[in-house]
Image (cartoon, rainbow, N blue to C red):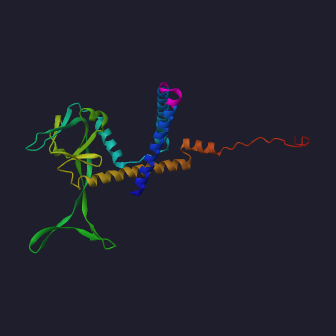
Amino acid sequence: MATQNTHKGYAGTIIMVILAIILIAGILVVLVWGWTGIFKFMFVLLEILMGLSLLFLLGYLFYYIFLKKQKFDVNFVNKQKLIDASTRIKRPLLKDLYVSGDKGHSRGLVGTITGYCRIQVLTRNYIYKETTQNGIEMKELVTIQNEKGEKIPQYTLDKIEQDVFTIKAKGLAGLFGDPMVIRTDPKDHDELVGDITLYGYSLIPIGEYWFLNTDHLDVRKIDYAILKEAERTIAFATLSDVKELIDRATGIDAKHKKLIEAKSLVDIPELQQVGNNNSPYS
């Protein structure tokens, strides 16, 4: 906290010094050239500010494109893949997407459907066994002990179908905002013709996606599926990096090979005779 206050104090001091310098320079200009010179001074100052802004912009673009390490966001990559998959096939019969609301609220418009696809996702179902304690029937989670004595819950894997809608908002939000990617169970909406209504009250964002309010706490259907998708993307990205390293090591990567050869070249300077011109080697 003290460090942040110190940085703010330094920034305020620098701004005050710059303003003081500009004010003193303006007063000197008025004293030397009169009030007509102040307009020239302001014009020159504006040119300097524009030039510095342009240099800063070019420097930032160079840093962002060539020097900055780009973050690999697994969820964002998977979201873009679903957007590409849903918009690859044109479906002219799909129009707008709505949420149904409840008895006291009418349905609400989400946006225009720009893409749709159906995928399969993995789900994890924990195994329970029925037990009776003090005359009360209960379900107990089935576990086994590992070598360390830890109890590991047992579960089965299954796959279910899931519908993916890519939505563009109406108005300015659709022009400048990112598209919404909504994932829902096929039974949670009506027929895929014309305007489609989702059976829910609202949409809740989880990660890069949107889910119905009736699903957003379903860890079995959402969290496990997204985690497995992320693991698959990381695995394939790692394989791609390994292939690139192997290509460079074996010389298959022609671009990298030429770069190494260019760095290995050494220019040998010509020997020049210095001193005795009567040398037998001259």
Majority secondary structure of magenta residues: helix
Whether residue 39 is situated above or below residue 128 in the rendered picture: above
Residue 193 shows up from this direction: no
Q: Is residue 172 left or right of residue 22?
A: left
Q: Residue 49 placed where, x, y %?
A: 47, 34
Indicate whether 132 appears above or below 117.
Answer: below
Q: Residue at x 22, y 36 (%)?
A: 111
Q: What residue is shown at x 43% (from left), y 50% (from top)? A: 9
Point out the residue furthest to the bottom here: 134
Farthest residue to the top: give it: 36
Q: Position of residue 163 (x, y in %)?
A: 23, 43
Quadrant assignment, res 278: top right
Q: Position of residue 125 (x, y in %)?
A: 22, 59
Which one is nearer the viewer's eye here, 276 or 40? 40
Q: Quadrant of the N terminus?
A: bottom left
Find the magenta span and give its range. Answer: 29-36
Q: Residue furthest front?
A: 31
Work out which quarter of the rendered image holds the C terminus and state it: top right
Please, is residue 60 above or below residue 224 in the view?
above
Residues 117 and 67: in front is: 67
Q: Is residue 203 left or right of residue 102?
A: right
Could you say which quadrant of the image residue 164 lies in? top left
Magenta includes 32?
A: yes
